Image (tube, helix red, strand yellow):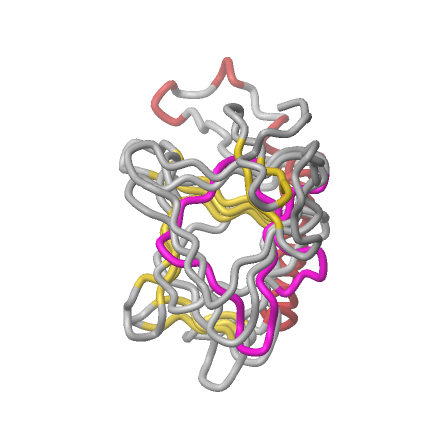
Amino acid sequence: MPAQEREEIDWNNQDPATVIYTIGIYGWRKRFVYFLILLIMVITIINLSLVIWVMRVMDFNLDGMGKLRITDQGLKLYHGEAEFVKELRANLIRPSQNSDLTLQSTANVTVNARSAYGNITGQLFIGNDEVVARNQKLYIKTDQGNTILYADRDKIHFAADKLEFSSPNGAHFSGSVETENLRAPPKKDLRLASLTRFLFMDAPEGMQFKSAAGSVSITSLRDVNIKSVNGKVLLDGQSMSFKNLMTATAANVAADPKAREVCVCASGKLFLAPVNSQCQVSITC
């Protein structure tokens, strides 16, 4: 029955058992529903197209994305560069065979080692003008596993066969230096100098100065003190010379002008006196 005819039915004269109820969406409501369905279909097609385009550009596949592959051993990058915006956490980072591993940053590079609770236990900081390593202990080992340098808060231990300073000004130590042997390279001079202050050398048992092919020279602007607490000072050589000693004159003593006596004051001062003078001269000790 058409809709217009149904509207003209006299409902008062109809049998209650034969009343007809209209069900459905008609008019502008029906057209609005069709429009919503069409709009949703268009948005779905656009989203699907964008997803396909992104997958195509990023080269997504079953093995990974682009040159980045997901393997059983982790992520693998083939012949390219990877940029990480924030942090990178990994157990192992290594390059491919016969390739270099390069870590770059426009600001700085920081490598942290953390405990199970997230606390930093070790850190390597590489900045624009400094390299800082923070840890309780520092080891430098050879490829055979032998330690050549060890450092902690109390000491620095060098285990190499030779420690060489190539600076033309030598090595500067603000504190004390303790060593068993100090020697110069072959055909080179060994020089210990203090430019403005004092130079102290102390040994608990003994001290030996030895030059196998040259001489030993001690030069000072002021005093040179050689002291042995419980032993003696031994000067051993084929000839012994004391230069620039002051010479005293003795009255009424005829002496050979070429001969001199070495005299010692109570203060330890040495001076020369004429022979046979028995050091009875006029000199201030």
Whether residue 46 appears in this view of the structure is yes
Does the magenta stretch mainly form a helix, a strand or a loop?
Answer: loop
Q: Magenta includes 176?
A: yes
Tell me the quadrant of the picture where the C terminus can be found.
top right
Q: Quick check: 93 left or right of 55? A: left
> Magenta segment range?
166-195
Where 54 sits versus 179, above or below? below
Foreground of the two, 283 or 88: 283
Q: Give the percent coordinates (x, y) of residue 244.
A: 71, 47
Which residue is most to the bottom? 98
Q: Give the percent coordinates (x, y) of residue 34.
A: 65, 46
- Across the whole image, how many numbered discs are drawn on residues? 0
Foreground of the two, 35 or 164: 164
The residue located at (64%, 48%) in the rendering is 193
The residue located at (29%, 39%) in the rendering is 231
Q: Quick check: 10 left or right of 245? A: left
Name the quadrant containing residue 245: top right
The residue located at (47%, 68%) in the rendering is 238
Name the quadrant containing residue 154: top left
Q: Give the percent coordinates (x, y) of residue 147.
A: 32, 62
The residue located at (52%, 79%) in the rendering is 78
Q: Give the percent coordinates (x, y) of residue 15.
A: 39, 20
Where 255 sits versus 71, above or below? above
Foreground of the two, 58 or 148: 148
Q: Magenta includes 218?
A: no
Whether residue 4 appears in this view of the structure is no
